[in-house]
Every structure is written in C-alpha cells, then in structure tokens.
Amino acid sequence: MRAVVQRVSEASVSVEGEVIGSVGDGMIVLIGIHREDTEKEMEYIARKISGLRIFEDDEGVMNRSVTDTGGSVLLIPQFTLYGDVRKGKRPSYIEAMPPDRAALFFDDFVELFRRMYGNVETGKFGADMRVSLVNRGPVTILLDSSRNF
C-alpha cells in the first residue's frame, strides 16, 4: 500500500456536486492499493497514519499524531499512486489492485482505521471525485508498506 498524507486545516471531497466527506484540522490521506497487498500491509499503513507525528506540540515541534490531537482524517482511494511511468509517458497501472478487489480492500481498510482511530470520513471508490484541501505547513508525507521510501 501507498499513502500520501497531508496535514490540513480543512479538506472535503465531493461527487457530482455533493460533498460526501469533509474534515477540519487533521489530515487527508490518499490511499493506493498494490495488487498483492494483504491485511499485513493494511495494518502497517493504518498504524503509520494514526501514529505519524506531524502536528506541533506546545513548543512548536512536530511531535504529536492525529491520535494525540483528536483531529479528523479524510481517506481517499487513489489507484494512480501505483502509476508507473518509467517506460514512457502514459502511466501503467499493472501494479495496482484490480478495481473489484480494491474496492473491497479499501472498505476493509476504512473499517480497520475506524476501529483504530474513529474520526474518519471517506471518498467514494471508483467515483469521479473533486478533492479540495488547505495543506497546513505545507506538510506532505509519503508512506509505502514495501518501505521503498
């Protein structure tokens, strides 16, 4: 799995002009699912996201997690995180999990994350989403369950 985590002061996602998820102070997380991902990768990424220390403490040091701050999390499925352009200019998505399996996997990830953390909003798998956000900092962190970065 891959995740792009951004610290935000606000973020929302809409489908066909209707807002389906929104958060205030917290984070937005774009989620990419690899074709061979299992529950092990799901748990790794969920733990990393919920424990990621990207929020300031009383001394202004990024030393607190979203769990510590009680912030909100907006999870957005994004298969393009596995787009590969090393052999040209048109991305290949062969490493991404096929949509039918990925939709179920994303739902399972959301449920796991809700059990771990609770305060979660989501995008809609397979929909043409419009995502708006105000990145605070800016702070953007890349996570990869294969630990490639």
Image (cartoon, rainbow, N blue to C red):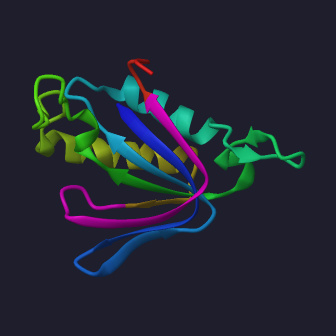
Residue 65: x and y in percent read 68, 43
Q: Is residue 59 left or right of residue 65?
A: right
Report if residue 53 lies within the magenta region.
no
Position of residue 13 relative to residue 30, above or below, is below
Residue drawn where x is 55% and y is 32% of the image: 48
Position of residue 111 relative to residue 22, above or below, is above
Position of residue 74 relative to residue 20, above or below, is above
Kindly give the residue lying farthest to the front in the view shown.
Answer: 89
Q: In this orientation, which residue lies closer to the viewer: 141 or 111?
A: 141
Q: Is residue 145 left or right of residue 10?
A: left
Quadrant hosting residue 116: top right
Residue drawn where x is 37% and y is 33% of the image: 2
Q: Main secondary structure of the magenta part?
A: strand
Kindly give the residue lying farthest to the right in the view shown.
Answer: 59
Residue drawn where x is 44% and y is 18% of the image: 147
Number of callouts: 0
Q: Is residue 43 left or right of residue 129?
A: right
Classify the position of the C terminus by image quarter.
Answer: top left
**Which residues, given as a range, are shown in magenta?**
123-143
Residue drawn where x is 50% and y is 51% of the image: 114
Classify the position of the N terminus by image quarter.
Answer: top left
Residue 120: x and y in percent read 50, 58
Q: Is residue 37 left or right of residue 53?
A: left
Residue 82: x and y in percent read 24, 33
Position of residue 26 relative to residue 15, above or below, is above
Residue 105: x and y in percent read 27, 40
